[in-house]
Image: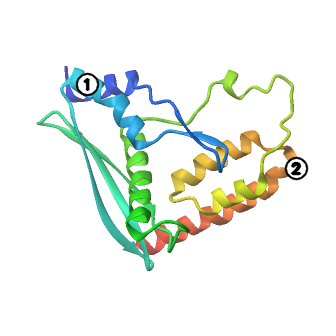
């Protein structure tokens, strides 16, 4: 079996559900650890090896963790990278915890890219069966959007919030999302 056929087999068979819950933001998510737990048996089955490495980059005066996930069969390899910005400070966390949190985000999204893990839900999962949403906790949602560690994290939070929000809450969610997305895009432009 070719390298790409093996990778395709892993991507096709991989099931990494959102098995963790953020009670603050009121959303489910998957962690890098849960992705690794799900993918390791498939890698062993196909003879592929996964490595993940972090590096630190500074763009526009802000510190980013760059995670690179690489899968190889010994001859061929493919990798995917993701960036997560360290906040200037995070209440209740020391510097090593802030770096570790950014590393976890970056690693998760590098793994999602490498193994083609998306956040699409099927129609039954998002069907409200005619029941309108009663809404979400807006202060918590706005805070979660503003504190997103990466563009991918921001998009995931936005998607969850948009689905759960009442119609009258959506303009504020969209406005907060657009502002935070502009921050990430500006940082990316200064990095170029």
Q: Residue lying farthest front?
A: 92
Who is closer to the viewer here, 94 or 75? Answer: 94
Q: Position of residue 34 (x, y in %)?
A: 41, 36
In the rendered view, would you say 118 is above or below 43?
below
The disc label shown at residue 6, or none: 1
- Residue drawn at (82%, 22%), measured in percent from left and top? 129
Measured from the top left, where is residue 104 in percent x and y? 41, 52
Q: Which residue is mark 2?
A: 168
Element assignment for label 1: helix
**Are circles 2 and 1 on residues that touch, CB within 8 Å?**
no
Does residue 128 sit above or below 109 in this rendering?
Answer: above
Asked if residue 187 is positioned above or below residue 152 in the image, the reply reads below
Give x and y (percent) for residue 9: 32, 22
Count the marks: 2
Whether residue 48 sits left or right of residue 55 in the image: it is left
At a point 21% along the width and 29% down the height, the residue shown is: 3
Q: Residues within 10 Å of mark 1 (few under 14, many from 20)?
A: some
**Location of residue 68 with respect to 128 vertically, above or below:** below
Quadrant in the picture for residue 4: top left
């Amino acid at each position: 079996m070719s390298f790409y056929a093996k990778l395709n087999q892993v991507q096709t068979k991989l099931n990494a559900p959102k098995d963790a819950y953020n009670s603050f933001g009121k959303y489910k998510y998957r962690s890098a650890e849960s992705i690794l737990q799900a993918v390791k048996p498939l890698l062993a089955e196909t003879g592929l090896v996964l490595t993940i490495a972090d590096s630190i980059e500074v763009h526009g005066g802000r510190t980013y963790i760059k995670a690179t996930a690489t899968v190889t069969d010994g001859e061929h390899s493919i990798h995917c990278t993701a960036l997560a910005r360290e906040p200037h400070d995070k209440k209740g966390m020391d510097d090593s915890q802030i770096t570790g949190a950014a590393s976890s985000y970056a690693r998760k999204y590098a793994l999602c890219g490498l193994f083609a893990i998306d956040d699409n839900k099927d129609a039954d999962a998002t069907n409200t069966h005619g029941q309108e949403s009663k809404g979400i906790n807006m202060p918590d949602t706005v805070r979660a959007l503003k504190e997103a560690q990466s563009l991918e994290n921001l998009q995931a939070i936005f998607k969850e919030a948009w689905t759960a929000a009442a119609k009258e809450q959506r303009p504020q969610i969209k406005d907060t999302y657009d502002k935070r997305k502009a921050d990430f895009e500006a940082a990316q432009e200064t990095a170029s």
